[in-house]
Image (cartoon, rainbow, N blue to C red):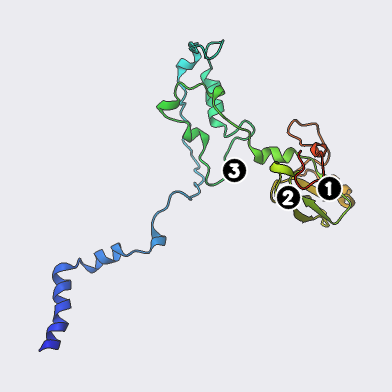
Amino acid sequence: MLSTARTRLPRLLSRHFLPPSSSLLSLHQPYSTASRTSDRVPTNDPNPPAPAQNVSETNALPSSPAGNRDMPLQEMPEDSERQRQMQAPNRKGVWSRSQAERAQAMSGPRFEQTIMEYQPQPWAAIELIHKQPVRWTTERKVTCDGGGGPLGHPRIFINVDKPQICWCTYCGLPYAHEHHRKTLESLPSTSFPLEPLGDAAEVPESQRVSDEPFGQR
C-alpha cells in the first residue's frame, strides 16, 4: 500500500499543480532560439524608405552664441543634414557591426536645433591608414613596433616574401619587398599608395628620432 501511494502522489501533484506540457515546452526553450537583435545584419531592402530630415529649418536663422563665439550660430539645414548622414568626415557608412549609424544615433528632438558643424566627428582611422605609403625593404622579414614609445605596440615580425602588400596587424602600416615593386606597380590599383603622395595623413618614417626600445616619435 505504501509503494502504491508513493507512485500515485507525483501523478496527483502534476495533475493539479503543474501547467500543461505545452506550457512546459515554451518555458524550457533553448537559449539559442531566443530572438536577438543586437548582432543582426540588416537585409537589403529593395525599396528603402526615404530618409526624413531631422534638422530643423530654424537653424538657418542666426541665433546668439551667448558669449561663447564671436559669430552667431547659423547653419543651413541641407549642410547639417549632410553632416548628420556622414559617419565620419572621410567615410559615409559604418565600419563595424557593433557601430550605430550616426544618422540614427543623432535623431529625434534632441538634435533638431543642433549645429552639426560644432559636434565632435573624428576622422575614421580605417580610411586614414590607407593613406600611408608602402615601406619597401630588401629583407624577407621586417619588424614593426608602431614607431616605438607610448604610441607604439609590441614588436611583431612580418613576412614579405610574397608579391603583395603585407600590413601590420597592430597598426596597419604596409610593407613590401623591393623585388616585387614592378609587379605591384603593374597592378591597376593597390590598397596602399606605393610612393608618398604628400597627403596630410601620411606619417613619415623620419618621425622616429631614436632606435631605443622606448624611443619617441
Separation (CA) of disc 2 from disc 3: 19 Å
Separation (CA) of disc 1 from disc 2: 18 Å
- Look at label 3 and name its amino acid: Trp
Residue 5 horizontal side relative to residue 138, left or right = left
Residue 56 image point, x, y percent: 45, 20
User: Which residue appears at 42% of the width and 26% of the height?
Assistant: 110
- Please identify the quarter of the rendering in which residue 215 is found: top right
Label 3 CA crowd tier, 10 Å (few <14, some 14–19, many 20+): some
Q: Mark number for residue 65? A: none
Q: Mark number for residue 168? A: 2
The mark lying in front, picked from 3 and 1, is 3
- Which quarter of the image is occupied by the N terminus? bottom left
Q: Which residue is under mark 1?
A: 184
- Look at label 1 and name its amino acid: Leu
Q: Earlier in the sequence, mark 2 or mark 3?
A: 3
Q: Mark number for residue 95? A: 3
Residue 8 image point, x, y percent: 14, 81
